Amino acid sequence: MAFVAFNDLGYEYLDQGYFVLFSENNTHNRLFEYAAKDLTSLPKLFSEYVDTRLDANLTPIRDQQSNEVIGQIMEVLKSAHEYYKYEDRRAIINEIGNYFNELLIFLCYKCRTISPDLPKSEEWYLERIKWLMYPLLSAGDTYPTDFYGKYKDWISADFYTSAGSEEDYETIVCDVPKKRPSGFREEIRIQKVICDMLYFILDMEAQDMGNLTLPQRMWLFANLFPDSYSEIEITRKLSFCPKPRFRSGTDRTQEIERNQRLKDIFAPLHSLDSRTIAKMQKNTKDCFKSAIKAAEDIETAPIYEEYEIDSLKQLLYLEIISMIQAGTIIRKCKNCSRYFVVNNRKVTYCDRVDKTGKRCSAVGSQRSFQKKMAEEEELKIYTRAYKTHFARVKKGTMGQDAFAEWCTKAKVKLEQVRAGKLDIAVFQEWLKK
């Protein structure tokens, strides 16, 4: 479990000790990078890992080493979102546990290749799931037994005493998978849902939805994809003042000392209320004045929203909800095809640096100019004349003042040609002078 705290500037992701692990501002770049990340290698890597740990009969393969594959899975997750730099171990353990339970249900009650009696044995179950989780487990972890409990709940207590035939298995056990499960299927599904939410709710260029209001687009999305997302139950806390945070790279001693000073100021005032404030004793008045002085240093006082979360899915849903509440508008950059927040509807390129080392916005300006050059003959001949005159300045055959004066006149005449007030041939002859 961790915490995510939202304010007007974005959010902070904190561990249980309220140490800030990472934060995100209102550019939402981590969310957009996650939406664009290719996660298709995860199922293949996961399958490769499982195949090196268990054979077709789910017998542990003891002579195989597969830590390298686990490392590759971790790298893919970490590159997808900052969240996984801190939660990759737990995420992979949960993936293994959920996958193993689904696989058992599928093999026992759909394929009938494994007797349902085998997984009933806690010893049989724990030997296999511990072997799958072994490279990730730490001392004190209870994940294997936790997932064994989930497995028993899935097949239900009634089944243990049921005398039903094999034909009854699938009706007794609910939600038997129709096909063999694959690893990280849920992760890829969540990514798709996130992409759908961004497109159908917030993307200003979404097809045929430009005239819909934000509430109308939310309603449309909910009815288009009723099964693609589920309600999230999260503990929410609201406060005027957040708990003290600790950040990497900062002097925690100073933070602790500051918090202690505030406690010293406010401790004598905790019994104060609106009915007794006029009757304060001198020492209480002095503390109150110190409190007022401390308050004067506060520049903003937003309402802090804090949530307890245990998955990236919850974090991303909350982030999109915060964007909806803020009326955020997004579009895909015409250079890198990734989303960015739109502050000016005329801007079509983001400020990311592309593979060539150039900003998308710079590349976009150049492309727009080249497109205009291809479409406007008058701009093409103006640009050619501009380069000629600029070369004269570099050679010293034309002065800076004369060049500036020429530019001003040339731009006026260019606009006259565009407006149809000056013939392009006359403009071209003038530029040759």
Image (spheres, rainbow, N blue to C red):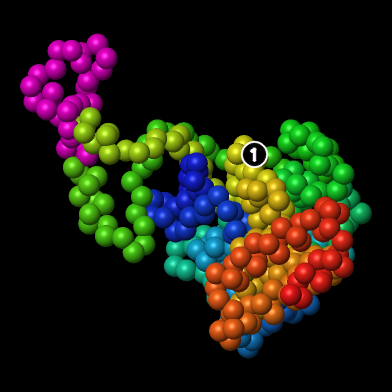
**Above or below, comparing residue 64 to residue 26 in the picture:** below
> Which residue is nearer to you in this view: 367 or 384?
384
Q: Residue at x 84, y 58 (%)?
A: 422
**Above or below, comparing residue 297 to residue 73 in the picture:** above
Question: Which quadrant of the structure image shows residue 187?
Answer: bottom right
Q: Is residue 139 left or right of residue 279?
A: right
Q: Please state the horizontal and vertical placement of residue 101, each as a whole percent of the image.
A: 71, 60
Indicate whether residue 272 is drawn in magenta: yes
Q: What is the residue that sits farthest to the bottom in this orientation?
A: 63
Magenta-highlighted residues: 262-290
> Which residue is nearer to you in this view: 99 or 147?
99
> Which residue is nearer to you in this view: 52 or 86?
86
Question: Which quadrant of the structure image shows residue 211?
Answer: top right
Residue 118 appears in the rendering? no
Q: Residue at x 59, y 74 (%)?
A: 75
Q: Is residue 57 left or right of residue 277?
A: right
Prevalent SS, magenta region: helix
Q: Mark 1 highlights which residue?
A: 327
Q: Please state the horizontal and vertical placement of residue 210, each as a whole percent of the image.
A: 81, 42
Q: Please state the horizontal and vertical placement of residue 212, each as a whole percent of the image.
A: 80, 36
Q: Residue at x 74, y 75 (%)?
A: 433
Residue type at mark 1 is: Gly
Q: Please state the horizontal and vertical placement of residue 255, each as a whole percent of the image.
A: 26, 52
Indicate whether residue 138 is drawn in magenta: no
Q: What is the residue that sits farthest to the right in this orientation?
A: 167
Q: What is the residue that sits farthest to the left in this orientation?
A: 282
Q: Residue at x 22, y 20 (%)?
A: 272
Q: Residues within 10 Å of mark 1 (few under 14, many from 20)?
A: few
Describe the element under mark 1 as helix, strand or loop. loop
